[in-house]
Image (cartoon, helix red, strand yellow):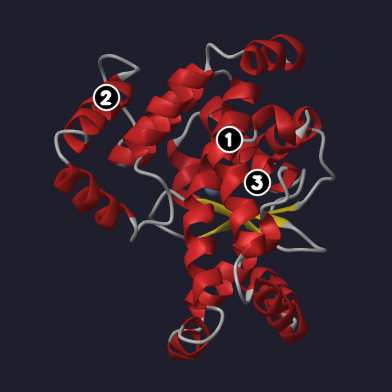
Amino acid sequence: MKARQIMHPADAKALQVLKQARGFNTLIKYFMQVGDERIMRGENLGTMLRVTPDNLPKVYAAFREVVCRVGIDEPELYVYNDPVMNAYTYGDTRIFVALSSLLVERLTLPELKSIMAHECGHILCRHTLYKTVLHIIEDMGKAAQVITGSLAFPAYCALQYWNRMSEYSADRCAAAVVGEQVFQSALLKLTSGLSDIQGDPYQLVEQGKRYYEMKNVSFFDRVQQACREMFYSHPQDCQRAYEIDRWKSSANYRYLTNNLN
Ligand SMILES: [Zn+2]
């Protein structure tokens, strides 16, 4: 798979803006000098379970399969104890993927593969360096206010916006690897927190349509919702469902599903 086959235009455009933002290079250099990637590795080894073929054979085999389909070097895979369904990938030279314990327990294996493929999509599109920087800034608390209140503030704002847009590209990777319907099913579980949801598998897509209709009622509605969305690290779940539903009729989706599966 090639990054250009899954990259959402808003992701590519936001990344371009980000690289031109005042202070961006300073921001990246600062965090690479601090060497926080090594701190993260210590955190992983110290507090999470590294997945191996022996301890979680089905999860590991699924991950290997996804990594091969996406066509990236195999990252380290960890599971951490968390009663919230979540997953993430960070790192620059040593990239890892982490899955929460509830995610592993509550999703079916194909749905879990879709989340693994989403994380691998971030790696394929080379999102991880910038996501690592953002993660570290957010973890720094007060110190982050000094950085984001300085010259690097425009870069930080651009980074946050790009972060949301990058999720659309990773979602496309998930849909390409497992099929869009499996990904929609995983999204339904992530949104609701429930493991058994009846009815239309595209119900979040319908919610997405209603959401965009509501946003487009007036200029005030658009601004109000845009301000609310700013506080999220990801696009709204219904927007993600809607975007993938639109992408499933694209030539890239058809090509990837015919050639990967
Ligand atoms: Zn993501």
Q: In this picture, is 180 found above or below 57?
A: above
Tell me: 184 left or right of 170.
left
**Among numbered discs 1 and 2, the one appearing first in the sequence:** 1
Amino acid tagged 3: His
Q: Ligand 1: does it lie within 8 Å of the C-beta at label 3?
A: yes
Q: Horizontal placement of 230 versus 95: left or right? A: left
Callout 2, which amino acid? Lys
Residue under circle 2? 209
Label ID, residue 8: 1
> Eyeballing the image, is 42 above or below 159?
below
The CA span between labels 1 and 2 is 19 Å
Element class at badge 3: helix
Q: Residue at coordinates 60% horizontally, 73% vertically from top-left?
A: 22
- Whether tag 3 and tag 2 are in contact, CB under 8 A, the answer is no
Badge 1 marks a residue whose secondary structure is loop
Nearer to me, 168 or 55: 168
First in residue order: circle 3 vs circle 2 = 3
Residues at marks 3 and 2, CA–CA distance in whole angstroms:
26 Å
